[in-house]
Image (cartoon, grey):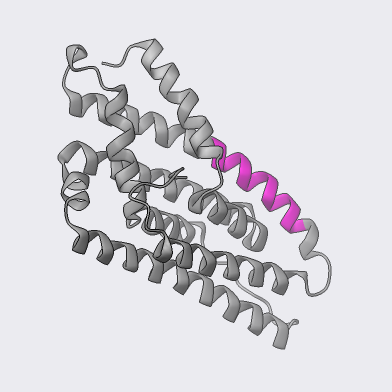
């Protein structure tokens, strides 16, 4: 079991990492602005679940195998970039549809669709997998019990604080997006911004050759 001091130190560092600009919190920000708070909450929860998936990968050795295979790493990175680009293109297409027919009602997607979107985008990001592989073991104390159990506990802590921080970000950004959406044409522009943001994240993932991101969040 984790001792209190280790858990507190881990949470403090995790808090700073989660706040640092990165793909996940930018996704929450973009979707909250364009689609509202529930969309942002869905992305936030999906990202948190994805983080716990990376914890399991690290505990089971899957992340280590990924790190040792450049081909597998490249394939997963390209898949993640393609998924982000697909989300961005869909947002731009939605913006074009709104611009052509502003009077047409737009049915919002259910929140669990955004949960799935956040989970997939996080879970197939190999940079996050390598980050967890390097980060979690630093807080594991072999003398305190099974390392895999401690890593699972650390993953739960990281996921929990991710939900809280990203949830607060979604709440704030969703409120701003609601105010902006009251202005004619603002909704289409918010979609354009979100679409370009996702495409930018996809390009960043492709061109980034660093073995580990400066901040995985």
Magenta-colored segment: predominant secondary structure: helix
Identified at 43% across, 50% down, the residue is: 46
The verdict on residue 12 being magenta is no
Identified at 56% across, 46% down, the residue is: 21
Identified at 69% across, 67% down, the residue is: 190
Picture coordinates of residue 52, whole percent (x, y): 33, 41
Residue 135 or residue 192, whichever sits in front: 135
207 with respect to 177 (left or right): left
125 with respect to 160 (left or right): left
Picture coordinates of residue 210, whole percent (x, y): 37, 52
27 with respect to 118 (left or right): right
In which quarter of the view is residue 91 placed? bottom right
Q: Is residue 193 above or below residue 172?
A: below
Residue 136 or residue 148, whichever sits in front: 136
Start-end of magenta stretch: 165-178
In which quarter of the view is residue 187 placed? bottom right
**Residue 213 visible to the viewer:** yes
Q: Is residue 162 above or below residue 42?
A: above
């Amino acid at each position: 079991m984790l001792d209190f001091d280790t858990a507190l130190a881990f949470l403090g560092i995790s808090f700073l990492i989660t706040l640092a600009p990165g793909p996940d919190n930018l996704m929450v920000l973009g979707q909250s602005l364009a689609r509202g708070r529930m969309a942002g909450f869905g992305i936030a929860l999906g990202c948190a679940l994805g983080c716990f998936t990376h914890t399991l990968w690290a505990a089971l050795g899957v992340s280590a195998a990924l790190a040792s295979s450049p081909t597998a790493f490249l394939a997963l990175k390209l898949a993640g970039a393609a998924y982000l680009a697909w989300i961005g293109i869909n947002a731009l297409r939605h913006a074009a549809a709104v611009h052509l027919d502003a009077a047409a009602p737009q049915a919002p997607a259910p929140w669990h669709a955004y949960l799935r979107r956040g989970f997939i985008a996080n879970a197939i990001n190999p940079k996050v997998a390598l980050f967890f592989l390097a980060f979690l073991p630093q807080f594991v104390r072999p003398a305190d019990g099974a390392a895999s159990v401690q890593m699972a506990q650390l993953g739960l802590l990281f996921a929990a604080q991710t939900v809280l921080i990203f949830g607060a970000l979604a709440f704030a950004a969703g409120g701003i997006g609601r105010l902006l959406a009251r202005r004619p044409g603002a909704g289409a522009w918010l979609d354009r911004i979100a679409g370009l943001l996702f495409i930018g994240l996809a390009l960043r993932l492709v061109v980034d050759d660093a073995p580990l991101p400066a901040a995985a969040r």
